[in-house]
Image (spheres, coloured by chain):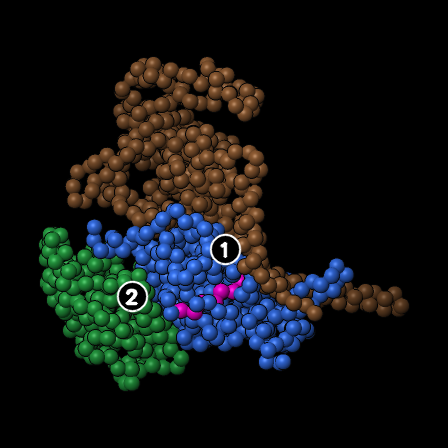
Chain colours: A brown, B green, C blue
Amino acid sequence: MYVAVKGGEAAINEAHKLLAEERRGDKAVPELSTTQIDEQLSLAVDRVMTEGSLFDRKLAALAIKQARGDLIEAIFLIRAYRTTLPRFGSSIPVDTAEMGIRRRISATFKDIPGGQILGPTFDYTHRLLDFKLAAEEGSDSEAPHVGNADLSATDALLDDAMPRVVDLLGHEGLIEEERPAEDDAEVGDLTREPMSFPVDRDIRLQNLARGDEGFLLALGYSTQRGYGRSHPFAGEIRLGEVAVEFIPEDLGFPIEIGELTLTECQMVNQFKGSAEAPPQFTRGYGLSFGHCERKVIAMALVDRALKGRALGEAVEGPAQDEEFVMEHSDNIQATGFVEHLKLPHYVDFQSELELVRKMRRKATDMSAESADDEIVEAAE
Amino acid sequence: MIGADANGSGADSNAIAATSAGFDNPVLQSQAMYRNLLSAMAQPGRIISCDLSLEVPLPLWPTTAAAALTLLDFDTPLWLDPVAATVLPLSDYLRFHCGCPLVQASGNAAFAIISDPAELPPLNVFAAGTDEYPDRSATLLIQVERLDDSRGVILRGPGIESKQCFQAKGLPSGFWQQVQENHSGFPQGVDMIFCAQDRIAALPRSTQVEV
Amino acid sequence: MTQAAQNAGMQVDQSDVTGEAKAGPDPHYNFAYLDEQTKRMIRRAILKGVAIPGYQVPFASREMPMPYGWGTGGVQVTASIIGPDDVLKVIDQGADDTTNAVSIRQFFVRTTDVETTTHTEEASIIQTRHRIPEQNLSEDQILVYQVPIPEPLRFLEPRESETRKMHALGEYGLMHVKLYEDIATHGHIATTYAYPVKVNGHYIMDPSPTPKFDNPKMHRMPALQLFGAGREKRIYAIPPHTAVYSLDFEDHPFEVQQWEQSCEICGAGDTFLDEVVTDDQGGRMFVCSDSDHCNRHQEAAE
């Protein structure tokens, strides 16, 4: 006799045990520490912090370890943890003009006050597998010319004044001004208020900053290929540390509570002008925790594309479509719903099955009828 | 005047808090009170008894205070009727325990507390939401001396099997006509929760009233 | 810090990451997991939903420790209403032992330590995915639905800004056109689950992907029905005894699925049946999807 499947609970518990085993892998191989992840997989940590919306390297490293290197799963762990944290208030806006710069490049001017600083970048590496890194030990000592850059000497060379390149254009009035409205002091938070369209820029930037890097990369790329093109120039990309200041209610003045590593991209884009505005450059903005350069460039392209409607440009490409972009950028929402297809759908499928059978019976009956008619006709 | 109250020092607030406490166990007591509120809203006109032991500053009643502790926080601007607004211990209590901003413009309030039905302004001074967002509307907590569900006006609509009698003591004249107008604006409108000493009843905008 | 601010916080200790059920709710998390500020926000949204039957109230859905699309909306609704005196039943596809139902039940046992049951009539809160229990519910019960796409017009118009206007203006012509196109093509309405309903004569509402077989149970149900869509950030409700009509046409009235077979376990001929494939030769049998109802019916027969 048929007995309905039971024991979902036991199956789940066993699955969790198997998962723990798989995560650890071969026990003959030393276990990875979260410190190692933080130090040596630092760009993975940066991405998890950015899309997880929580600046905490230790927790991000833990999440990566627990998620077996699946970064979206790690981001998910961080997001779920973040939800449980109490909220004390908002910091005062960080000032990236005052950033302690480690990397700073501009594609718009050959020379800029403070200079171009290459910093730690893959940009001019030849993408040749470095088999020296495959040696399990001792690779540190084998690449002195890479590993021992004289940081103190570099620091000494850096200029104190590193104005943001886009601000230089601003002095000439060549680029659109961006100032928060007087009555718009409150910073929105899409994790506290559901989005309603059209959204304000603060919510848009928050959405994009949390958005999936791959999704933004593809959308940004699409704008370059003509789906909502607006001739971008990388005005400036800078990486470094900024101070975070907070005004406790009982003190009434700002105190520094810590430091963040940020990557910022200010894109300069063409704009032909409209009835209201003279021709001028427009901006796209990208910002991430840590060093997420690809992300901030793509984000700046999409941010600029989404300005299209406000600038009176034709909205033709997906990247210009606010609802489309904002509703599909979150990889935690996306992965949840895409993967929920793994859940049982017996009931809906049964309903569809019954319907398809019914429709096929009807179709078969009808063709049988018409076949009968043909036979009758032939007989006549 | 409310603005002036808002500048009351923290020491005063703490003194008030010490004399008039909030829930002993905020998590479980607010859950229990919420279920009372939910039952009331889901079954318009039905009287729901609330088992509360709260010491609250007059003219606030335990049910009203419990509803406020359950529903209000810094996201919910609160309007107090002009009489209640002058009672410093009351506004301090609500600000301290709920953390809600007090507003003077009734149209900006997410919640309103009307300590005495005689003080109830016309319903249409409160936010009724929009056709696209009818949820952006006020909820009124109206204190009444007595609730009766055996006589009075007849209520029909969602939450009511066939019909429900309802009466609340001391409502201003013309109130039921305003309720009918409130209903006719559906989906826009305000929702009301009547608070007696130890019982509550609700009247959402979806309820039709036969006087 | 004010009392309110303290209440908004909650104690979280990362040290315990094992999930063993123990006596009393897990002390590392707030009761029912959500912090009190979040519960208040959801509680207010539910009250507005109840006051405006069938209207989708936007709410600031939180990131839960389970994936979006796996019941986070229903879980947040249940977490906001549940108390220590509640008795909880969780079903998925009608059954209590489906893996995701088990997982959600474990979550609430861990975070609230409430009593759970598989018996429909013993539950004060029933959280469900894709089914309404066969047994009639009472005024003392609350049915919480997990909803993937709350917007019934979404497949006709993908833009929220447009569908919101359509609801505001009561412009539901598009939905009727869609259903009528089915009739023109197939001779009947080819929607078998998530079959749209009209609530209290006003809003068109998605009943979640329940089979249309269950739609008549929503009409004037004595229990309060709450719907939570976590990823889409919407909550909606149907108060007890509210009129819920499945959309249809005079010449093509709404009808539910029927089976030629009866349940092979309990013999019921009036329930929603799951088809079970028994071999690769086309063998199949039909059994009740509502496992509790099936057990009861079977016990009664013996």
Residue lying furthest right: A379
Whether residue C10 is visible, yes or no, is yes
Q: Which residue carries the number 1 mark?
A: C70
Where does the C terminus of chain B fall, quadrant-wise?
A: bottom left
The amino acid beneath tag 1 is Trp
In the shown orientation, is residue A16 left or right of residue B33? Answer: right
The secondary structure type at the circle numbered 1 is loop
Magenta-drawn stretch, dominant element (helix, strand or loop)? strand
Q: Which residue carries the number 2 mark?
A: B29
Q: How many marks on residues?
A: 2
Relative depth, front residue between A259 and A267 = A259
Disc 2 crowd rating (10 Å Cα; few below 14, some 14-19, many 20+) is some
Where does the N terminus of chain B fall, quadrant-wise?
A: bottom left
Disc 1 crowd rating (10 Å Cα; few below 14, some 14-19, many 20+) is many
Residues in magenta, as a range: C86-92
In the shown orientation, is residue A334 left or right of residue C184? Answer: left
Task: Please tell me which residue is depicted at 25% across the width and 71% down the height of the picture.
Answer: B52
Relative depth, front residue between C157 and A303 = A303
